[in-house]
Amino acid sequence: MAPLRFSANVSWLFPELAGLPARLRAAGGSGFKAAEVAWPYAEPPEALAHAAREAGLRLVLINTPPGDREKGEMGLGAVPGRQAAFREGLEQAVLYAKALGCPRIHLMAGRVPQGADRAAVRSEMETVFLENLRHAAGVLAQESLVGLLEPINTRITDPQYFLDTPQQAAAILQKVGRPNLQLQMDLFHWQIMDGNLTGNIREFLPLVGHVQVAQVPGRGEPDSPGELNFPYLFQLLEDEGYEGFVGCEYRPQGEGGPGGRELWTDLDMAALLLTGR
């Protein structure tokens, strides 16, 4: 049974530090061996790669570009009429992934267009998503990269997001049928949308290429007050044989240095949590 490995999501952690290089250095200094970042595109890839090397970190996940944030875009994979922009963003993400030595890219589905009825556009958006995912799978395979699909909850975080349940994502993965496309399991989103985490983890874990964690509903550290029993969930992931990374994608609640935020970085930290010491 392999121990869990944790990665620092530096888009969320160390918010007091400006710039991703500084956050990468802080993550390494806190004991992390891996990191992930949502959108690295404001920094030159060489600068990020240098900062990661200096910090002793491997980059394990980035996202495709969100699109035009000023127009409310949050990914383009399933958005009708934005296929060319999605493919351009994919090329940029691949360039960064290669420069950073990052093996996984979250292929963001995007939002239901403003003013559109979700049910009315669902079929069209799924068709667009399937076409884009087949294209992406081919591009990623050429570089030995993995693409990930992440359901994002539509009850709290993003009511317009197209992909919002593990069941929907798994069905799409089955239709695409490409081995280098996998599921990204964020337990924060899964709990809000469906609960039943034990059953869903056991059912969908064979499809999962990456896990992320945060407490519900406040999206704080896993040991902050909330609904989820993370000692149990971490043990379940280990018992079920999960060997990927667990991304710490939470909003730090504490004050002061990383030690006060309970940043879990390795098996020893996880063991402390699991035993309650």
Image (spheres, rainbow, N blue to C red):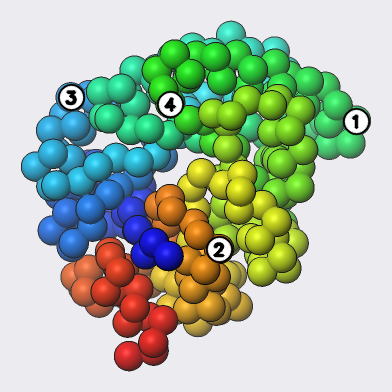
Q: Tag on residue 145?
A: 4
Sequence order check, earlier mark of 1 and 4: 1
Disc 1 marks which residue? 120
Disc 3 marks which residue? 46
Q: Are marks 3 and 4 in contact (CB under 8 Å)?
A: no
Q: Are marks 1 and 2 in contact (CB under 8 Å)?
A: no
Q: Tag on residue 240?
A: 2
- Left or right? Give the position of 125 relative to 157: right
For the residues carrying marks 1 and 3, which lies nearer the camera in this image? 3
Sequence order check, earlier mark of 2 and 3: 3
Residue drawn at x 33%, y 53% is 7
Residue drawn at x 26%, y 74% is 268
Mark 4: amino acid: Leu
Q: Quadrant of the C terminus?
A: bottom left
- Left or right? Give the position of 61 relative to 227: left
- Left or right? Give the position of 159 relative to 147: right
- Label 1 neighbourhood size at 10 Å, few (<14), some (14-19), many (20+)? few
Residue drawn at x 20%, y 33% is 48
Q: Are marks 1 and 4 in contact (CB under 8 Å)?
A: no
Mark 3: amino acid: Glu
* Residue 144, quarter of the rendered image: top left
Q: Give the x, y percent position of residue 254.
A: 32, 75
Disc 1 versus disc 4: distance between alpha carbons? Answer: 34 Å
